Amino acid sequence: MTEFVKSIEIVEKKSKFLGYLLLCQNENDIKRALEFLKTEHKKATHICWAARLEKPFFEKAVDDGEPSGTAGRPILNVLQKKDIKNGAIFVVRYFGGIKLGAGGLVRAYSKVAGELVK
């Protein structure tokens, strides 16, 4: 079982975004959390995420099928701006039938990540 520090839910134009904050020490922690979320949210449209580790230095942003740069990168930007190290944010999206466009996706993923790190 993966222990998330915080989780939230935000709805934007009928799409549901579930955000999860994980404190992690290595890439295996991130991998286990992602596997857990994929099992828990089998019907999700996307599970986008970003993570930062201090030692060894590691940064990664994953869009998981969303248009390039609209999900993982905005999440990573929040981690960088708040200088969060050894942390990961996962955002599970259930598509609600209304396309948000690139700007809408960036705003939605940024909003979820920002709320998690408050």
Image (cartoon, rainbow, N blue to C red):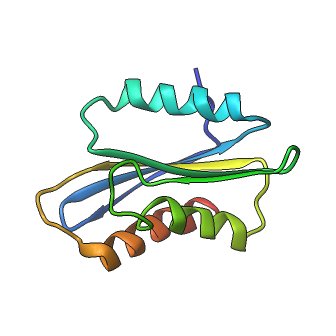
Location of residue 100 with respect to 64 vertically, above or below: below
Residue that protrudes farthest toward the right in the picture: 55
Name the one closer to the observer, 33 or 28.
Answer: 28
Q: Can you tell which quarter of the image residue 17 is in?
A: bottom left
Horizontal side, residue 117 vs residue 46: left or right: right
Q: Is residue 59 visible?
A: yes
How many circles with numbers are drawn on the protein? 0
Expressed as whole percent of the image width and height from the top left, the position of residue 5 reads: 65, 43
Name the one closer to the observer, 61 or 99.
Answer: 61
Location of residue 78 with respect to 46 vertically, above or below: below
Expressed as whole percent of the image width and height from the top left, the position of residue 68 reads: 40, 63
Residue that protrudes farthest toward the left in the picture: 97
Horizontal side, residue 15 vs residue 73: left or right: left
Expressed as whole percent of the image width and height from the top left, the position of residue 18 reads: 40, 49
Q: Residue at x 33, y 57 (%)?
A: 66
Residue that protrudes farthest toward the bottom in the picture: 103
Q: Can you tell which quarter of the image residue 31 is in?
A: top right
Horizontal side, residue 28 vs residue 11: left or right: right
Expressed as whole percent of the image width and height from the top left, the position of residue 50 reads: 58, 53
Q: Is residue 118 visible?
A: no
Q: Quadrant of the N terminus?
A: top right
Q: Residue at x 43, y 62 (%)?
A: 71
Q: Quadrant of the C terminus?
A: bottom right
Q: Residue at x 79, y 37 (%)?
A: 25
Residue that protrudes farthest toward the front in the picture: 68
Location of residue 112 with respect to 89 vertically, above or below: below
Q: Can you tell which quarter of the image residue 116 is in?
A: bottom right
